[in-house]
Image (cartoon, rainbow, N blue to C red):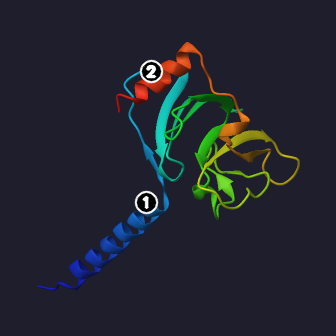
Amino acid sequence: MNSKPLLITLLLASSFIAGAAHAAAQSDTSKVKTTVEFCEAGETQSSKFIASADTFVLSCDCDCTAQENRIWIIPNRSRQTYQLDASKAVSTLELKGIAAIPDTFGPVPLCEKPQEGGNGITILTKMPSTGGASPYCYAAEPFIEKSIAPCESAQCKKVLASLGRL
């Protein structure tokens, strides 16, 4: 019996698994399942926990070109809810070393290289590009908790309360 093909298959599989584990180790974002639906018809609800920022992010993503989505950001530290309209809220750490953001029709470049450092949240807003091969780009701005007022609406309180059930 020739065990060489089996050995090669096992080596290839183990290197693939190791590569996947390495990619997962670089990510500090994990999906979170919520039991309450906050989005309107035609929107997709997604929720995640960004470990480096110790923050929950819940969003209602539209299936549209502009990607103007409702996003709630809830830092564990303050337990305040912040609501904003933007394309995406992502981990600042995960933006290191990437030139484009995955999008519906393919990768979309960043308008400018984001600021280095920080273990926070970066807000991405899709906008028309002023040049280059892509018609759009993502502007990246750090989320600064002190620069936005907490949301006190009934819906924001409901979002916060739903996280207590996780």
Please report the residue visible at 35 percent of the width from the left and 33 percent of the height from the top. 166
Disc ID at residue 40 = none
Q: Residue furthest left?
A: 1
**In this rendering, does residue 66 appear at all?**
yes
The mark tally for this picture is 2
Other residues around mark 1 within 10 Å, as few (<14) / some (14–19) / many (≥20): few
Q: Nearer the viewer, residue 88 or 42?
A: 88
Above or below, 17 relative to 91: below
**Disc 2 marks which amino acid?**
Glu
Q: Nearer the viewer, residue 57 or 98?
A: 57
Which residue is denoted by mark 2 in the rendering? 37
The Cα–Cα distance between marks 1 and 2, rounded to whole angstroms, is 28 Å
Please report the residue visible at 78 percent of the width from the left and 39 percent of the height from the top. 127
Q: Nearer the viewer, residue 76 or 67?
A: 76
Query: On the rendered structure, is 166 left or right of 95?
Result: left
Disc 2, SS: loop
Query: On the rendered structure, is 58 left or right of 112?
Result: left
Which residue is denoted by mark 1 in the rendering? 24
In x, y percent, where is residue 35?
Answer: 37, 25
In x, y percent, where is residue 48?
Answer: 47, 40
Disc 1, SS: helix
Q: Residue furthest right?
A: 130
Query: On the rendered structure, is 128 left or right of 62?
Result: right
Decide which of tag 1 and tag 2 comes sooner along the chain.
1
Query: On the rendered structure, is 142 left or right of 166?
Result: right
